[in-house]
Image (cartoon, grey):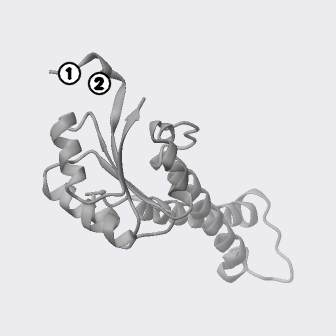
């Protein structure tokens, strides 16, 4: 049964002082059955994504496929222009010369791969996202400096305000704060 003040609650957030503390807490949280969790850190923490159950991205496959598409488009463009649309026989050289098409093919491969990586990353991360409820926690400003945070969302099936607060306090954080929407 939720209270009226819980309806605006996004979740709970625990603040840790070291990346190792955050990693241990994330593993314990995932092991306890929580699934809507997220970690925030001013630097990359090796293993944090796996600890919170973050799924592997399909972005490398997208970049690879778009790179192949770019290569096909580049080679096809050169072939179309040189052989079909505007063939010019200069000094008896063949109209279709593969080595001559390599620079354009390479450049379009890189262009398509880079653009798919950039746009794919923006889409996968839900960017631009100018507002997130965690910014309502005053101490979260230190997440870009020297603190490490772990949040559990209120929509998690395991979430119960008192039990989750007690669980987070059992992980020895510096502080546990409520995150309001």
Q: Residue at x 37, y 73 (%)?
A: 46
Quadrant that contains the N terminus: top left
How packed mark 2 is, by other alpha carbons closer than 10 Å (few <14, some 14-19, many 20 or more), is some
* Vertical position of residue 56 compared to residue 130: above or below: below
Q: Position of residue 79 (x, y in %)?
A: 67, 66
Secondary structure of the residue carrying numbered label 2: helix
Residue at 38 percent of width and 58 percent of height: 58
Residue 6 left/right relative to 167: right
User: Which residue is more in the foreground, 73 or 1?
Assistant: 1
Residue 95 screen position, x and y as percent: 73, 74
Residue 83 percent coordinates (x, y): 71, 65
Q: Residue furthest right?
A: 91
Please tell me the numbered disc located at residue 154.
Answer: none
Mark 2 = which residue? Answer: 6
Q: Which residue is mark 1?
A: 2
- Identify the image quadrant of residue 111: bottom right
- In front of the other: 12 or 157: 12
Measured as percent of width and height from the top left, residue 119 is found at 57, 51
Question: On the picture, is 112 further left or further right than 26?
Answer: right
The residue positioned farthest toward the top in the image shown:
4
Gap between marks 1 and 2 measured at Cα: 6 Å
Q: Is residue 104 above or below residue 134?
A: below
Q: Depth check: 30 or 77 in front? A: 30
Rendered position, 161 above or below 94: above
Quadrant position of the C terminus in the picture: top left
SS label for mark 1: loop
Labels 1 & 2 near each other (Cβ < 8 A)? yes
Quarter residue 85 falls in:
bottom right
108 left or right, relative to 56: right
């Amino acid at each position: 049964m939720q209270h009226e003040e819980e309806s605006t609650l996004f979740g709970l957030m625990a603040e840790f002082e070291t990346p190792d503390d955050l990693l241990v807490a994330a593993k314990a949280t995932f092991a306890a059955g929580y699934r809507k969790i997220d970690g925030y850190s001013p630097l990359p923490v090796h293993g944090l994504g796996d600890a919170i159950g973050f799924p592997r991205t399909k972005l490398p496959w997208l970049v690879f496929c778009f790179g192949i598409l770019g290569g096909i488009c580049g080679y096809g463009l050169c072939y179309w222009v040189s052989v079909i649309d505007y063939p010019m026989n200069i000094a008896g050289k063949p109209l279709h010369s593969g080595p001559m098409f390599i620079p354009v093919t390479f450049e379009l491969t890189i262009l398509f791969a880079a653009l798919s990586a950039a746009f794919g990353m923006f889409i996968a991360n839900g960017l631009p996202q100018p507002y997130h409820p965690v910014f309502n926690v005053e101490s979260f400003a230190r997440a870009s400096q020297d603190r490490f945070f772990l949040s559990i969302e209120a929509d998690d099936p395991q979430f119960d305000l008192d039990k989750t607060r007690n669980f987070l306090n059992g992980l020895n954080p510096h502080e546990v704060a409520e995150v309001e929407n």
